[in-house]
């Protein structure tokens, strides 16, 4: 019996899950495990790694069973814009403040897709910033400065 990959997108995403799960287990191998009642720092990453490996095995198996569309062109624009957006947010949270860095992130992430409308981006920006402020600043009390002048 010869196995043929009929859904390469499922197969390769399953392999990715398996690789991330194995990496999580590898990185946490030197941490003490503890027990289920008194978890050590290695318990959670190992458990998540095992879950990722199981999920990856299931998804990889569907790559042999289901018929997929195939993997298309590599989305370079999206990958570059998303990477720049996350890097800008990481830099901006300390230098620009919480709200401007979120606005830049949401704007850049929206541009990663070719199907965006500026009115929708502005509305989602307002809703996401308000929700993030409500959760992280107001409810959780995280000490992020809102703007660069509030340091």
Image (cartoon, rainbow, N blue to C red):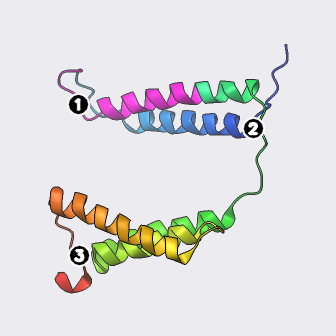
User: Image quarter for residue 47?
Assistant: top left
**Residue found at x 26% / y 30%:** 32
| Residue where numbered disc 1 is placed | 40
User: Image quarter for residue 61?
Assistant: top right
Mark whose residue sits in front, 1 or 3: 3
Q: Position of residue 128 (x, y in %)?
A: 37, 64
**Residue found at x 29% / y 72%:** 98
Above-or-below relation of 104 to 5: below
Label 2 with label 1: CB-CB less than 8 Å: no
Q: Position of residue 28 (x, y in %)?
A: 36, 36
Using the image as rendered, state which of residue 25 and residue 53 is in the foreground: 53
Label 1 with label 3: CB-CB less than 8 Å: no
Above-or-below relation of 63 to 103: above
From where the camera sits, is residue 37 visible? yes
Mark whose residue sits in front, 2 or 1: 2
Image side of residue 21 versus residue 101, left or right: right
Figure quadrant of the C terminus: bottom left
- Assess disc 3: are there few (<14), some (14-19) or many (≥20) residues with their C-alpha within 10 Å of its C-alpha: some
Indicate which disc, 2 or 3, sits on the residue closer to the N terminus. Answer: 2
Image side of residue 84 versus residue 128, left or right: right
| Residue where numbered disc 2 is placed | 8
Q: Position of residue 145 (x, y in %)?
A: 20, 74
Which secondary structure type mostly characterizes the magenta part of the structure?
A: helix
Using the image as rendered, state which of residue 92 and residue 121 is in the foreground: 121
| Residue where numbered disc 3 is placed | 146
Indicate which disc, 1 or 3, sits on the residue closer to the N terminus. Answer: 1
């Amino acid at each position: 019996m010869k196995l043929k990959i009929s859904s390469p997108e499922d197969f390769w995403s399953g392999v990715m899950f398996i690789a991330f799960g194995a990496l999580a287990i590898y990185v946490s191998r030197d941490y003490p495990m503890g027990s289920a009642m008194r978890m050590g720092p290695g318990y959670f990453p190992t458990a998540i790694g095992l879950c990722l490996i199981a999920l990856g095995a299931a998804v990889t198996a569907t790559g042999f069973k289901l018929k997929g569309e195939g993997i298309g062109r590599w989305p370079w624009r999206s990958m570059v814009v998303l990477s720049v957006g996350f890097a800008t947010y990481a830099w901006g949270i300390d230098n620009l403040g919480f709200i401007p860095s979120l606005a830049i992130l949401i704007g850049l992430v929206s541009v990663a897709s070719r199907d965006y409308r500026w009115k929708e981006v502005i509305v989602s920006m307002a809703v996401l910033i308000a929700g993030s402020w409500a959760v992280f600043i107001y409810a959780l009390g995280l000490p992020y400065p809102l703007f660069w002048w509030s340091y």
